[in-house]
Amino acid sequence: MKLTANKISPMDVFIGERIREERLKLGLSQEKLGELVGLTFQQIHKYEIGLNRISASKLYEISQTMEKPMKIFFDDFEDDELFFNFKPANENEHLGKSSEDMKRMSVLIKSFNQIRSEEVKRDLINLVKSLGSIRSLSKL
Protein backbone atom coordinates (compact mmCIF):
# COMPACT_ATOMS: atom_id res chain seq x y z
CA MET A 1 0.00 0.00 0.00
CA LYS A 2 1.41 3.41 -0.94
CA LEU A 3 1.06 6.58 1.11
CA THR A 4 -1.45 8.94 -0.43
CA ALA A 5 -2.79 12.34 0.52
CA ASN A 6 -5.93 10.96 2.17
CA LYS A 7 -4.23 8.30 4.29
CA ILE A 8 -3.18 8.98 7.85
CA SER A 9 0.52 8.38 8.32
CA PRO A 10 1.73 6.34 11.30
CA MET A 11 4.51 8.90 11.74
CA ASP A 12 2.00 11.77 11.92
CA VAL A 13 -0.05 9.87 14.51
CA PHE A 14 3.08 9.06 16.52
CA ILE A 15 4.30 12.67 16.52
CA GLY A 16 0.81 13.87 17.42
CA GLU A 17 0.68 11.51 20.37
CA ARG A 18 4.05 12.79 21.54
CA ILE A 19 2.90 16.40 21.27
CA ARG A 20 -0.16 15.53 23.35
CA GLU A 21 1.92 13.68 25.99
CA GLU A 22 4.34 16.57 26.38
CA ARG A 23 1.55 19.16 26.37
CA LEU A 24 -0.24 17.32 29.18
CA LYS A 25 2.97 16.91 31.19
CA LEU A 26 3.34 20.68 31.07
CA GLY A 27 -0.28 21.21 32.06
CA LEU A 28 -1.09 23.08 28.84
CA SER A 29 -4.49 22.99 27.19
CA GLN A 30 -4.75 22.68 23.43
CA GLU A 31 -5.98 26.25 23.41
CA LYS A 32 -2.98 27.55 25.39
CA LEU A 33 -0.43 25.67 23.26
CA GLY A 34 -2.15 26.95 20.13
CA GLU A 35 -2.03 30.49 21.47
CA LEU A 36 1.70 30.16 22.23
CA VAL A 37 2.54 28.95 18.70
CA GLY A 38 -0.03 30.93 16.72
CA LEU A 39 -2.53 28.17 16.00
CA THR A 40 -6.13 27.39 16.92
CA PHE A 41 -6.88 24.66 19.43
CA GLN A 42 -8.61 22.83 16.55
CA GLN A 43 -5.33 22.72 14.63
CA ILE A 44 -3.46 21.45 17.69
CA HIS A 45 -6.14 18.77 18.06
CA LYS A 46 -5.75 17.73 14.41
CA TYR A 47 -1.97 17.47 14.87
CA GLU A 48 -2.40 15.41 18.03
CA ILE A 49 -4.65 12.84 16.37
CA GLY A 50 -2.48 12.72 13.23
CA LEU A 51 -5.22 14.06 10.98
CA ASN A 52 -3.03 16.94 9.78
CA ARG A 53 0.67 16.68 9.04
CA ILE A 54 2.80 19.12 11.01
CA SER A 55 5.55 21.02 9.21
CA ALA A 56 9.12 20.75 10.46
CA SER A 57 9.17 24.46 11.29
CA LYS A 58 5.98 24.26 13.35
CA LEU A 59 7.22 21.14 15.15
CA TYR A 60 10.41 23.02 15.95
CA GLU A 61 8.40 25.97 17.25
CA ILE A 62 6.34 23.65 19.46
CA SER A 63 9.50 21.96 20.77
CA GLN A 64 11.00 25.35 21.62
CA THR A 65 7.81 26.50 23.30
CA MET A 66 7.75 23.31 25.38
CA GLU A 67 11.52 23.61 25.99
CA LYS A 68 12.00 20.06 24.70
CA PRO A 69 14.46 18.75 22.08
CA MET A 70 12.88 17.86 18.73
CA LYS A 71 14.12 14.29 19.00
CA ILE A 72 11.54 13.49 21.70
CA PHE A 73 8.87 13.58 19.00
CA PHE A 74 10.65 10.76 17.13
CA ASP A 75 12.14 8.65 19.95
CA ASP A 76 10.99 5.02 19.85
CA PHE A 77 9.17 5.30 16.50
CA GLU A 78 9.20 1.93 14.79
CA ASP A 79 9.33 1.93 11.00
CA ASP A 80 6.27 0.54 9.28
CA GLU A 81 7.76 -0.58 5.97
CA LEU A 82 4.49 -2.13 4.80
CA PHE A 83 2.57 1.11 5.20
CA PHE A 84 5.11 3.24 3.42
CA ASN A 85 6.04 0.61 0.80
CA PHE A 86 9.56 1.80 1.49
CA LYS A 87 12.98 0.20 1.58
CA PRO A 88 15.63 2.38 3.24
CA ALA A 89 18.39 3.19 0.79
CA ASN A 90 21.95 2.27 1.47
CA GLU A 91 24.27 5.25 0.90
CA ASN A 92 26.40 3.18 -1.46
CA GLU A 93 23.37 2.49 -3.67
CA HIS A 94 23.44 6.16 -4.65
CA LEU A 95 27.16 6.85 -4.72
CA GLY A 96 28.51 3.59 -6.06
CA LYS A 97 29.31 0.35 -4.36
CA SER A 98 33.09 0.57 -4.10
CA SER A 99 35.55 2.88 -2.42
CA GLU A 100 37.00 3.44 -5.89
CA ASP A 101 33.66 4.86 -7.01
CA MET A 102 33.65 7.12 -3.96
CA LYS A 103 37.13 8.42 -4.89
CA ARG A 104 35.99 9.04 -8.47
CA MET A 105 32.95 10.96 -7.23
CA SER A 106 35.15 13.13 -5.03
CA VAL A 107 37.49 13.95 -7.92
CA LEU A 108 34.53 14.67 -10.17
CA ILE A 109 32.95 17.05 -7.67
CA LYS A 110 36.21 18.90 -6.96
CA SER A 111 36.92 19.26 -10.67
CA PHE A 112 33.37 20.40 -11.41
CA ASN A 113 33.61 23.07 -8.71
CA GLN A 114 36.74 24.49 -10.37
CA ILE A 115 34.89 25.19 -13.63
CA ARG A 116 34.06 28.90 -13.82
CA SER A 117 31.73 28.93 -16.79
CA GLU A 118 28.08 28.25 -15.99
CA GLU A 119 27.52 27.28 -19.61
CA VAL A 120 30.27 24.64 -19.47
CA LYS A 121 28.84 23.32 -16.18
CA ARG A 122 25.38 23.06 -17.73
CA ASP A 123 26.78 21.28 -20.81
CA LEU A 124 28.76 18.89 -18.64
CA ILE A 125 25.69 18.03 -16.58
CA ASN A 126 23.71 17.36 -19.76
CA LEU A 127 26.53 15.18 -21.09
CA VAL A 128 26.67 13.10 -17.90
CA LYS A 129 22.88 12.74 -17.88
CA SER A 130 22.85 11.58 -21.49
CA LEU A 131 25.65 9.08 -20.86
CA GLY A 132 23.70 7.72 -17.89
CA SER A 133 20.60 7.34 -20.05
CA ILE A 134 22.52 5.52 -22.76
CA ARG A 135 23.93 3.10 -20.20
CA SER A 136 20.54 2.40 -18.63
CA LEU A 137 18.94 1.93 -22.07
CA SER A 138 21.61 -0.60 -23.04
CA LYS A 139 20.52 -2.79 -20.12
CA LEU A 140 17.03 -3.19 -21.59
Image (cartoon, grey):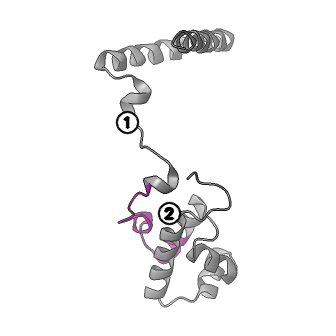
- Residue at image x 52%, y 17%? 113
> Which mark identifies residue 23?
none
Image quadrant occupied by the C terminus: top right
Mark 2 crowd level (few <14, some 14–19, many ≥20, 10 Å Cα) = some
Please tell me whether residue 18 belongs to the stretch shown in magenta. Answer: no
In the displayed structure, 113 sits above or below 75; it is: above
Q: Is residue 64 left or right of residue 119?
A: left
Tell me the residue that label 2 is attached to: 11
Look at the image and give the residue range highlighted in magenta: 62-80
In the displayed structure, 54 sits above or below 94; it is: below
Residue type beneath disc 1: Asn
In terms of sequence position, does the residue under pointer 2 or pointer 1 come before the other? 2
Residue 57 location (% of width, % of height): 59, 60
Report if the CB atoms under discs 2 and 1 are less than 8 Å apart. no
Residue furthest left as drawn: 99
Q: CA distance from mark 2 to mark 1?
A: 21 Å
Q: Nearer the viewer, residue 120 or 41?
A: 41
Q: Secondary structure at mark 1?
A: loop
Residue type beneath disc 2: Met
Question: In terms of image quadrants, where is residue 90?
Answer: top left
Mark 1 crowd level (few <14, some 14–19, many ≥20, 10 Å Cα) = few
Residue 139 location (% of width, % of height): 51, 13
Residue 17 location (% of width, % of height): 49, 76
Q: Nearer the viewer, residue 102 or 36?
A: 102
> Which mark identifies residue 90?
1
Q: Nearer the viewer, residue 75 or 112?
A: 75
- Residue at image x 43%, y 43%? 87
Residue 97 location (% of width, % of height): 34, 23
